[in-house]
Image (spheres, helix red, strand yellow):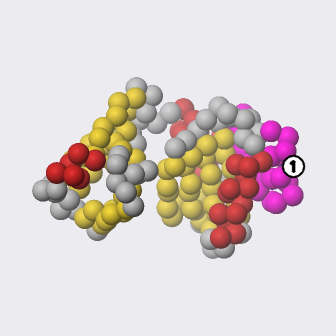
Amino acid sequence: MATKVNSNTSFYGNTVISTNSESTNLKNEITPHNNSKIGTETKISSLSGSMMLNKSQLNINELLPIKSEFDKIVEIFLTKSGFKIISEEKIEHNKIIKAKKSLDEKVYLINVLDSNDIVKEENLKTLFFKSIKENIEKTIFISNGAFALDSVNYANVNSIEIFDKEKLNKLVTQ
């Protein structure tokens, strides 16, 4: 199995990454960064373009990830709602999840934003256009922060379900 990486690729959590590649360039491009909030971030730093790394070139050893309180609430919400995760992609503070409900064949596109920032209309537009591009009918935006009025209006017009931390907590504790 190969992993596609480029200069924006990061591995988050307690991930230990090393390379078996004899390429000195590749060894120099894998750089660890420490950040006490998220554990270790290892970044593929200076690639121009992208490259495919296979198992013989890249060792990814995932240790137990450190989950925030928000991550735990989101996980409980998804489980209680009957979602089965198909795929998950992390982009900065966003986690983009594709999931199905057990009795439903529809795919949901779920954006989880682990940030206290106020969610603006542009954030929802990005999710909405991604769902159109990928032909996904149902979209959900979950945020650790609050939603601006323009984003609430945009969500209502475009049938995007939105959940802030307070609303999630109420649903999870029911």
Residue type at the position of mark 1: Asn
Of 98 and 93, the residue lying toward us:
93
Residue 67 point in image, percent of width and height: 46, 36
Q: Where does the image place residue 29, in percent across and percent down from the top left?
A: 28, 47
Regarding mark 1 in the picture, which secondary structure is present there?
helix
Given residues 114 and 49, the one toward you in this image is 49
- The single residue placed furthest to the top in the displayed view is 36
Determine the image quadrant of residue 108. bottom right
Identify the residue shown where x is 26% and y is 43%.
16
The residue sitting at 77% across, 39% down in the picture is 147
* Closer to the camera in the image, 145 or 69: 145
- Quarter of the image with the N terminus is bottom left
Residue 104, quarter of the rendered image: bottom right
Spot occupied by residue 51 in the image (x, y as percentages of width and height)? 33, 63
Q: Is the residue 57 above or below the residue 33 in the image? A: below
Q: Residue at x 18, y 62 (%)?
A: 56
The residues colored magenta run: 148-169
The residue identified by callout 1 is 153
Image quadrant for the C terminus?
top right
29 within the magenta span = no
Name the dominant secondary structure of the magenta segment.
Answer: helix
Relative placement, left or right, of 26 versus 51 is: left
Residue 63 in sight from this viewpoint = no
Judged left or right of residue 59, residue 104 is: right
Q: Residues within 10 Å of mark 1 (few under 14, many from 20)?
A: some
